[in-house]
C-alpha cells in the first residue's frame, strides 16, 4: 500500500509544470579563503570558515548573508566547527593546541 501511494505522489509531481528557482548566496566573509555550510535552521546557517593567513578553521554562524557572519571560534582552541542549528541553538566541536590537547563537543 505504501508503494502505491509513493508512486501516485511521483506521478502527480511529474505532471506539474511549475519551475523551481534557486538562489545561490556566497557566505564567505572577508578574512576567510572559503567556507562550508553544514547546517541550517530557521533563518540561521552554520558551518566553518578557513582563515586566509593562519589557515586555521573557525566555526561560523550566518543569517542569510556573508555580512551577517558571527565567528563562534573560542580563542583557546586551534580549530572549531559548527554542525547544526535549530535557529537559536548551535552545536559543534573544537580542538585545542599544545598539551594537553583537548577535544570539545558542545
Image (cartoon, helix red, strand yellow):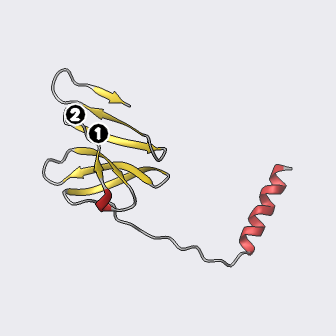
Locate residue 95, reporting x and y percent: 26, 32
* Residue with the mark numbered 1: 80
Residue sitting at x 36%, y 48%: 47
- The local secondary structure at tag 2 comes to loop
Q: Residues within 10 Å of mark 1 (few under 14, many from 20)?
A: many
State left or right for residue 1 relative to residue 23.
right
Q: Residue at x 24, y 51 (%)?
A: 50
* Residue 48's disc number: none
Which residue lies at the image location 15% right of the left edge and 26% below the top edge?
Answer: 98
Residue 4 picture location, percent across and down: 84, 56
Position of the C terminus, as image quadrant, is top left
How packed mark 2 is, by other alpha carbons closer than 10 Å (few <14, some 14-19, many 20 or more), is some
**Marks 1/2: CA distance?**
7 Å
Residue 31, percent from left and from top: 18, 57
Labels 1 and 2 touching (C-beta < 8 A):
yes
Q: Residue furthest left?
A: 53
Which quarter of the figure has residue 78? top left
Q: Nearer the viewer, residue 8 or 106?
A: 106
- When the figure is inspected, residue 78 is found, relative to residue 58, above or below; the finding is above
The dot on residue 77 is 2
Amino acid at each position: 500500500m505504501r508503494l502505491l501511494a509513493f508512486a501516485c505522489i511521483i506521478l502527480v509531481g511529474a505532471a506539474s509544470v511549475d519551475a523551481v528557482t534557486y538562489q545561490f548566496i556566497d557566505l564567505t566573509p572577508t578574512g576567510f579563503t572559503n567556507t562550508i555550510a553544514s547546517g541550517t535552521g530557521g533563518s540561521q546557517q552554520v558551518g566553518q570558515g578557513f582563515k586566509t593567513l593562519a589557515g586555521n578553521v573557525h566555526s561560523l554562524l550566518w543569517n542569510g548573508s556573508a555580512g551577517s557572519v558571527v565567528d563562534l571560534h573560542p580563542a583557546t582552541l586551534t580549530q572549531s566547527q559548527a554542525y547544526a542549528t535549530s535557529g537559536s541553538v548551535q552545536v559543534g566541536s573544537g580542538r585545542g593546541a599544545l598539551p594537553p590537547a583537548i577535544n570539545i563537543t558542545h
